[in-house]
Amino acid sequence: MRYYLEGSTLFIRGSFRAASTGFSGGIRSIPTLFNHTVSPGWNHADPGKELDLVTRAAGIDPDAFGLLTAVPMQQACVLQYDCVTVFITAGIRREPPETAGTINIIVTSSEGMEDAALLETIMVATEAKAEALAGLGLPLTGTPTDAVIAASEGETRHRSAGRATEIGKRVRDAVLRGIPEALRRHDAGAQSNRFAFFAYSRFEGGHWVEWTPGQECPYYPCHFKGQACDFCYCPFYPCKDERLGQWVESAHGGRIWNCASCTMIHEPAVAAYFRKFPGASRQELLQVSERSKRKD
């Protein structure tokens, strides 16, 4: 999986088995998920046409699951908890709160899920959304235009994803953390050229950490002097490319992808190329890296 912002659209590309409650949703295998910000004054009469325009403008396969919102995509929150990555945009007009706004949630897993587990993931995300709104004291469980996508890649491992399962717990925690933050960013009119990124860290008992790019990071340089920090958390993880990493045994059993020794995404030439061409493939970036090293 890789994800990137392109104009007013957040694209998530991969090889997914997915379920969507959005327009033209359903359950099927699909290469692209996206969340798109519509223009002010957009006519709600034909969402299918708007979704089609997004895929055509991006030059991608029109067979995609897409969601629409009025929330600027730069106000989105991305939350990563082990194999689970959750993307949230949220906006609510308080007057009247029960009739206006949109909350979109996209849940992805790098571990495969059966179709029933994908549907359970939608249930868990929706329940967590309602719980988060109640915690904020808002008199609603959602808005009339909310939508959820649940998607997974890889070999099927999870037959169930209810809130009592490990993967369900991660989805619930990410949504509970993400909804208040996404609403805060929207209410504040956050201005940024990127979305907010949060990762779950088990350091000192476990907590969510917001990552901010730049050399003010207390861990800089975590790889090498002069590294580019634009992509602290690699958007290709887990790439499963054994030229860049390897499978290792986890402390809790099973295997996890370890790419601690890979510095490709931190090479200045690669980061600059990826900023300019956010749809670039991993193989394309490897070629940029090789060319840059030859020049050096």
Image (tube, rainbow, N blue to C red):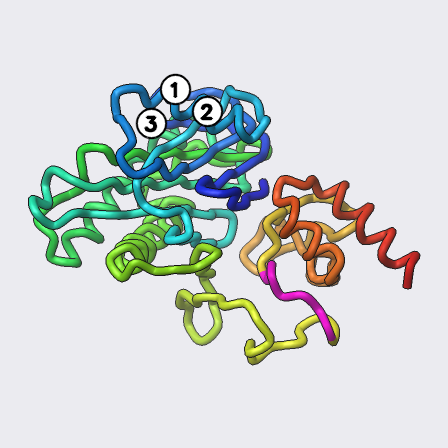
Q: Which residue is mark 3?
A: 22
Q: Quadrant of residue 14?
A: top right
| The C terminus, quarter of image | bottom right
Which residue appears at 33% of the width and 27% of the height?
22
Q: How many marks?
A: 3
- Depicted 120 relative to depicted 258: above or below: above
Which residue appears at 30% of the width and 58% of the height?
189
Which residue appears at 41% of the width and 25% of the height?
51
Q: Residues within 10 Å of mark 1 (few under 14, many from 20)?
A: few
Give the image location of residue 214, x and y in percent.
Answer: 57, 71
Out of 218 and 113, give the one closest to the viewer. 218
Find the magenta span and give its range: 226-232
Out of 279 and 39, give the one closest to the viewer. 39
Q: Any magenta on residue 229?
A: yes
Q: Is residue 83 left or right of residue 249?
A: left
Under tag 1, what secondary structure?
helix
Mark 1 or mark 3: which comes first in sequence? 3
Mark 2 or mark 3: which comes first in sequence? 3
Out of 18 and 167, give the one closest to the viewer. 18
Give the image location of residue 292, x and y in percent.
Answer: 85, 56
Give the image location of residue 123, x and y in percent.
Answer: 28, 36
Q: Which residue is mark 1?
A: 49
Is label 1 or label 3 in front? 1
Q: What is the C-alpha distance between the residues marked 1 and 3?
A: 14 Å
Q: Which residue is mark 2?
A: 53
Is label 2 or label 3 in front? 2
